[in-house]
Image (tube, rainbow, N blue to C red):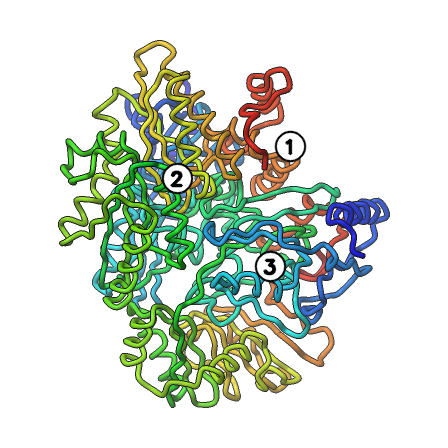
Amino acid sequence: MPTDPFLGELRGILPGGSLLVSEEERRPYECDGLTVFRELPRCVALPRTGAEVQALLRVCSRHGVPVVARGSGTGLSGGATPHPGGLLLSLARMNRILAIDPLLRVAHLEPGVRNLQVSEAAAAHGLYYAPDPSSQVACSIGGNVAENSGGVHCLKYGLTVHNVLGVRGFLMDGEPVEFGGTAPDAPGLDLLALSIGSEGLLMVVTEVIVRLIPRPPCVQLAMASFARVHAAGDAVAAIIGAGIIPAGLEMMDRKAAAAVEPFVAAGYDLGAAAILLVESDGTAEEVADQIADIERVLRAAGADSVRIAGSAAERLRWWSGRKNAFPAAGRLSPDYYCMDGTLPRKHVGRALEAIEAMEERYRLRCMNVFHAGDGNLHPVILFDANEPGSWERAERFGAEILELCVELGGTITGEHGVGIEKINSMCVQFTAGERAAFQAVKESFDPQHLLNPGKLIPTLARCAEYGRMHVHGGALPHPELPRF
Amino acid sequence: MTDAPEAVLEGLRERVRAAARDREPLRLRGHGSKDFYGEALEGEVLELGAYAGIIDYEPSELFIRARCGTPLSVIEATLAAQGQHLAFEPPRPGADPTLGGAVASGLSGPARLYLGAARDFVLGARLLDGHGELLAFGGNVMKNVAGFDVARLLCGSLGILGILTEVALKVLPRPRAERTVRLELPAAAALERFNRLAGQPLPLTACAWHEGQASLRIGGAEPAVEAACVQIGGEVLDAGMAEAFWRGIRDYALPHFSAATLWRISVPATTAPLPLPGAPLIDGGGAIRWYADLPAGTAVREVATAAGGTAQCWRTPARGTRSFAPLSPVALELHRRLKARFDPHGIFNPGRLVPGL
């Protein structure tokens, strides 16, 4: 086999074992958490230092080779799907906690540090890192920055963008950059905000400074059952309307509760159309005050039953069902496809009814769990990839849910990102001018278009083609719905 | 009689297109309360105050969307009627500022380090760019990761990328109870106290030090506030006095802020008292240090940089002093490229945020 000068240069940067070129070594990197999209990268690099990342980027930039950065590979939108001609840059070995400053309440992290690891390391100081995506045992902080990850406590504690104080890293040409820091209000445009959630299209992050906050000493959980989904949706609005910001506010529909109950024995009311979990945290005084308010509002909103967890064990059991919805889906069905749209809370009931109608139309089952407090839906579509046409139906089903979210004044992705998965739906949510603005941002940072190309921003041609597929006879889908 | 918003917006678009055609710089202005802020004020004034009005407000959805010319007083009164507020406490220096100006300046009040800055509350924005095109970014929902976060980028952009015609902000319930406690402490001890307390689960919403006194504001449920007051100690300030004090910091209205020369230094909150003459007013739990009347020639920026922060010259009679700390060459280049793409003819607020841009 003739020697490849590009690979030769990479070998000069990385020690042996840090560059993977054989097919069997590259295979584990062919997809991220969204396994329906697979692609073998040209090679995989596993740098251990920022200097190695910089050198790799310089070589790729000079050779015009695309670079896809990857953390733990738990992403759900194909954001880390490799480029067939490109370098897959795994940051998993850059996994050191560089420093924790308990008095200033910050942690300096390499991108491969796992989300939960941060809170574990900060626990000795009574502090923790608030964003807690469901995959927090495995997902990396660098991936969280790329996706602006959320979790079940965003309503009160914010997303990644609210909890990251600064990032350091490199542009595609190897130029070092630093945005934000431990001092507030850096001068100039807020490039930190722009870099968070940029899905690896603008820069490669090699250090993240996160804010740590005091661990609340008290946590309490209320669970309410509702005979109608609409009533549960109204209860969510009533809680927030009453001036209560719970730490977590989650909903499960009957199908989701029934799916998880056999596995976790949480004690869910399987007769209920919807179950709400409402968590309060803070000082003992705050929690006692808030839980009493929450219980009162839930009852007034027509809950059939309201229970307060009697112990920490019971609270964790009630949560475990919610957190195990995806594994439960995996037991019910050979494959499942999890969606991530957000809509105004008041439309939640309506959206669930529309999804029910879609189940019949696409001949696929769908169970719903969602971050009700944020209006962030996670419909889980069950399908069988081995059955011809099943995945295609699931994909169209998912796209229709996202279009519904946009029509109801929401968005196609609340926390999972666009990646490759929702790139067509970007055509629905944004005008050509807005997509051109995204392209302008991209080109400001990466004029060569080498960082994670083909993700996040659809081309004009792609949108034109998607539009032809979806707009029939000039009519938009769901003509019965008011447009926003 | 006022024009319909659509007509006002169309007028703005025409003006922008004409300015782009004629390469005529425009100086964007809401109510002018922040004319003092930033670098150069150049170009023909383009008044935005007429594009006003709340578009959408639903208390249970926790957001408000309004046109850029809407006065903050209107927004805040509307929210207060529902027991809600803008938790980042947008400053009101002088005349009643507009929403657009509040977001374009990105300024935040004393709660900044505890509840978040203006940028943390931006959910969505509409931009009239240098092509005269209206673009929408973000939305009205808390969780939204579709596309780059351009809405947040516009917060604090001082209008250099275009006209922020519409903004959606996250709103929060007002704390049910609020108290301010005051303790006599030297600056170093106050900084230590602020940071130690911020590491404990207490509902702190502001910490400031001025003239030998540390003031700590606590907001939340009544019993929690009560318990926190006991834990922190000190003397509980009369509610009216407390409100006047925090408003005086928020609006730069305390006498300390009226100095002829005023520097605002941002540092990590635990930074020891800086080696600069005179006593600062400390806000943001230690992260923001205001120095009045530093002698000419004081190496303020060097001191700030050495402490890991930046210094901003808020006010000076000396000509030619830049306000903001200079950007690194790579950051400056990114600013240039973004400016060139959003505002290719350089018509919006030239030089206001970065000299030459």
In what quadrant of the picture does the C terminus of chain A appear? top right
Q: Amino acid at mark 2?
A: Ile
Measure the C-alpha gap from mark 2 to mark 3: 45 Å
Q: Secondary structure at mark 2?
A: helix
Q: In the image, residue A54 lies at what x, y percent? A: 45, 44
Q: Are marks 2 and 1 in contact (CB under 8 Å)?
A: no
Q: Secondary structure at mark 1?
A: helix
* Residue found at x 72% / y 58%: B356
Q: In the image, residue A269 lies at what x, y percent? A: 20, 38
Bin the neighbour count of mark 2 within 10 Å (Cα to Cα): few under 14, some 14-19, many 20 and up: some
Q: In the image, residue A210 lies at what x, y percent? A: 37, 57
Q: Determine which residue is flagged by label 1.
A: A432
In the image: residue A120, left or right of residue A373 = left
Q: Kindly identify which chain the residue marked by label 3 belongs to.
A: B
Q: In the image, residue B189 lies at what x, y percent? A: 35, 84
Q: Determine which residue is flagged by label 3.
A: B103
Q: Amino acid at mark 3?
A: Val
